[in-house]
Image: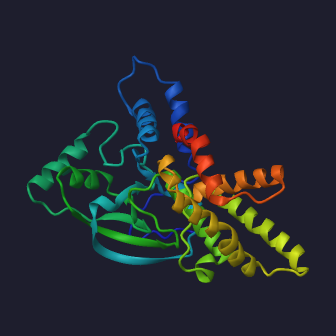
Amino acid sequence: MATPRPGRGFPRKPGLVPRALSTCAAFASWSFDMPPRLPWIGFLLRLFSLAKREPALLLPFDWVKDHVPIRGWRYLGLQEVEVEKIAGSVDRYDDFDRAFLPLRGEDERQKRIEEALARGEVLPPVKLYKIGEVYFVVDGHHRVSAAKKAGAKFIDAEVVELLSDVPLSPKDTEKDILLKAEYASFLRHTKLKELRPEAEIILSEISGYRKLLEHIDVHRYFRGLEEKREIPYEEAVASWYDRVYRPIVEAIRRTGILKKFPGRTEADLYVWLSEHLYYLAKEKGIAPDLEKTAREFAQKYGAKLRSSV
C-alpha cells in the first residue's frame, strides 16, 4: 500500500538498508583520525540501548511499516502534537537519538531555529506520520529537536495517520514492536479475545507466539483422537486456554515462582513449564503435579534463566 504524502516535501527513502547492518559496516570502516560523527556514536548508543533495555535511537518508519500490519490511512490535518510522542523518522533516524539530540553535533540551521524559538517566532508546522501513539517525522527534524531542547510540550504538525491494530507506544523498542505485532497476529488467527475476553498472554521472546500456535494444534489433534471427531479450530483454542494454558498459569501464580524470573512474564513461564511438564510426563508415564513441578522448576532453573535475562 502506498503511503500518503500530505502537503509538499514529504521525502521517503525506498529500500533502506537494515540499521544494524549499515551501522556495523560504517563502524568497521571508521578510523580514529576522522572527526566525530554518526557511526561510532550510533553504534555505542545501540550497545547501551541493549544493555539498559531502553530505546536509544529513533524508530525507522519504513521498518515499522514493514512489520506492523497497516489497514488504511486518514489525513488528520493540522493539530498540536505532544512532543514526547515523536519517536521516529522517515529518513533521518540515524541523525538524531530518541531524545532528538543531533548525533552529528548542532549545525547552523539548528542554531537559527533555536534562536527563532527563543525570540518567540512562529515556525511552520512539521509534517508527521502517526502509527498507534507514535509519530514519525517526515519534515522538520530540526524544529522537533529545538522544541524538545526548549522543553516545549506541544508542536504544530500536519499529520497523516496510518491505521493499525498494533498498539505502538513512544517508549517501544524495535523488539517491543515485533512482539506486539506477533501478538496482534496471534489474536487475529485464534480469535482468543473473542472467545476468552479476559485472556492476556504477553510474551517477552520473539517467536513465542508461534510456539503457542503449535501448542493449540497439538491440543486439537489429541482432543480429536480422544473424541473421535474433528475439533473446530475455535473450539480447540478455547479448550487449550481452559484446559492447558490457564491451569499452568494459575499454578505459577499460586506458587509465586514468577519473582524468581525477573523481566519475564507468566506466558514465558507457561512456555518453559509446559515443555518441562511434557518431558516429565513422557519420562514417568503419568501427569506430574503442577504446583510441585512449578516449585522444582523454579528452584532448578530460576537462577540460570535469571542470569540470561
Residue at (23, 53) in percent of width and height = 148
Counting from the top left corner in percent of width and height, residue 289 is at 68, 59
User: In front here: 86 or 121?
Assistant: 86
Counting from the top left corner in percent of width and height, residue 243 is at 69, 72
User: In front here: 25 or 13?
Assistant: 25
Residue at (55, 31) in percent of width and height = 25
Q: Is residue 166 left or right of residue 80?
A: right
Counting from the top left corner in percent of width and height, residue 82 is at 27, 65
Quarter-of-image position of residue 288: bottom right
Quarter-of-image position of residue 271: bottom right
**Does residue 106 lie above or below 8 as drawn?**
above
Counting from the top left corner in percent of width and height, residue 293 is at 65, 53
Image coloring type: rainbow
Q: Is residue 85 visible?
A: yes
**Does residue 6 lie above or below 202 as drawn?**
below
Q: Is residue 91 left or right of residue 119?
A: right
Q: Is residue 280 left or right of residue 135?
A: right
Residue at (62, 47) in percent of width and height = 296
User: In front here: 120 or 19?
Assistant: 19
Q: Is residue 132 left or right of residue 111?
A: right
Could you tell me which quadrant the N terminus lies in?
A: bottom right
Q: Is residue 206 visible?
A: no
Outermost left residue: 119
How many numbered tags mark residues here? 0
Residue at (21, 62) in percent of width and height = 153
